[in-house]
Image (cartoon, rainbow, N blue to C red):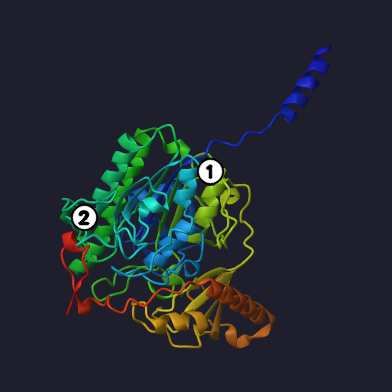
Amino acid sequence: MKITDMLVVLLAAIVAAPVFAESPPNILLVVADDLGYGDLACFGDANVKTPNIDRLAAEGVKLTDCYSAAAVCSPARTGLMTGRTPQRVGVYSAIPFFSPMHVPESEITIATLLRNAGYATAQCGKWHMNGLFNLPSQPQPDDHGFEFWFSTQNNTLPNHHNPYNFVENDIPQGPIEGYAADIVTDRAMRWLSNERDREKPFFLYVAYHEPHEPIATAPKYESIYAQLEDPAERAYYGNITQMDTAFGRLLAKLDELKLRDDTLVVFTSDNGPALTSFHPYGSAGKMRAKKGYLYEGGIRVPGIVRWPGRVEAGSKNRFPVSGIDILPTFCELAGIEAPKDRTLDGVSLASMLRGEVAKVDRPKPLYWQYNRARSEVKVAIRDGDMKMLARLTMKPPMTPNITAERMAVLKTAGLEQFEMYDLTKDASETNDLAADGGERFEAMKAKMIGLYKDVQSDAPIWPDWGYLRYESERIEWPDYKALRKPPVMK
């Protein structure tokens, strides 16, 4: 055989050979708590010092139009874990202690899917996806796919310093010295270094408590902001830097273990910055409103992805993405099939992260609903660059309690008084285009009503546990060791 003929045969064999997918990546998902869109130096805050998160952005892609799945914590985390609008799951607001609300065991989380596909899985930090935390009558982190968990139900108590309410694999840990960000990071690093199955890829979900109140910040971080007059402001900015430093140690551990190149790192926040009398300094940048609102400041959050060799370092992407995209994206990257027996509202961003496309096909608008929103508008969608918001035809109760009245509004209210904004020209949502009407308005309104009704039909009803009430002024909370008992009512 001539050399040229041999080359032709060899080339044909190479072309015909099967193309094997790359190995499933390790995945580190990091979620801050109440960190606003403008609370990072790399997202425009000139006051705050966040060198480690800024470095992550320089090494990866910054998602400029990244959204939480909800305007408050529990539904946002539910969307992250399930790929579903949290209304479909039944998580309608922040879940108080002893609430019937929870993510049912029938829901399939990304942790369960990855664990079943051969991943080692762990969760460290804030859980906040059930009311009966560490009690057998509701699913716990291990029931939702985490082989190891080191968690709190909601916030660290009494604050970020020396917390006493962490639970590790069902066992309350009692008081732990230190600050929450360091405690969570130390436990995550110990799992990475010594406890995971190294024959498997890993999924590590780290949910920091910072900068959610009540804040406690180490003096060395407050002193960085000594020029600020208000001690609460020094504590707030110091709290973010404290978290950033802890996160930097976690990234350094990946390098030490030679895991950087094989690990996809995603950093985001659960919602916009809080706005309370003790916590007024969080920044949503130029966005309108803050946590608890469906305007951009309540739901648009920082988003950063680092994946060496796949994601272009120092790049930006303006395609609208959401926490509900996490599940389908991680499924595709891990080579597993996303659930087909239920409605998934997110889409896979894998091709975008690989640099194959600048944006992906999103067949239906992004959707948010929060009946306890601080504004009159309770429902919102984003379709391309256009955003629409609407009020409910019934006034929902603002109580966090599950009541029959609250469930009735959930299942029967319609939409009215629509607002519409072009986010390419008006990210601050100051120019309402609804009055202009026209085909664009009517088409978007029809999409919104159709999606609202679809979600409304899926939304489950929780029982009214009338014998328990969760308003802080009516409950005298016991210490954590007694939390397995009902609260003492005033």
Helix, strand or loop for disc 2: helix
User: Residue at (32%, 36%) from the top-left corner?
Assistant: 195
**For residue 18, above or below residue 140:** above
Question: Which disc is residue 334 wearing?
Answer: 1
Identify the residue at the far top of this view.
1
Q: Name which residue type carries label 2.
A: Tyr
Q: Residue 82's x, y, as percent?
A: 48, 58
Q: What residue is disc 2 on?
A: 221
Of 66 and 347, nearer the camera is 347
Q: Which numbered disc, 1 or 2, marks the residue that appears first in the sequence?
A: 2
In this rendering, position of residue 3 left or right of residue 214? right
Q: Quadrant of residue 275?
A: bottom left
User: Residue at (48%, 54%) from the top-left corner?
Assistant: 62
On-image quarter of the N terminus: top right
**For residue 187, above or below residue 320:** above
Q: Residue 351's x, y, as percent?
A: 60, 49
Q: CA distance from mark 1 to mark 2?
A: 38 Å
User: Residue at (52%, 75%) from the top-left corner?
Assistant: 380
Q: Residue 288's x, y, as percent?
A: 43, 75
Question: Which disc is residue 416 wearing?
Answer: none
Helix, strand or loop for disc 1: helix
Q: Quadrant of residue 197?
A: top left
Of 158 and 225, nearer the camera is 158
In this rendering, position of residue 286 left or right of residue 190? right
Residue 422 visible to the viewer: no
In this rendering, position of residue 446 left or right of residue 79? right
Mark 2 surroundings: few (<14), some (14-19) or many (≥20) residues within 10 A: many
Q: Name which residue type carries label 1.
A: Ala
Q: Residue 139's x, y, as percent?
A: 37, 58
Of 135 and 319, nearer the camera is 135
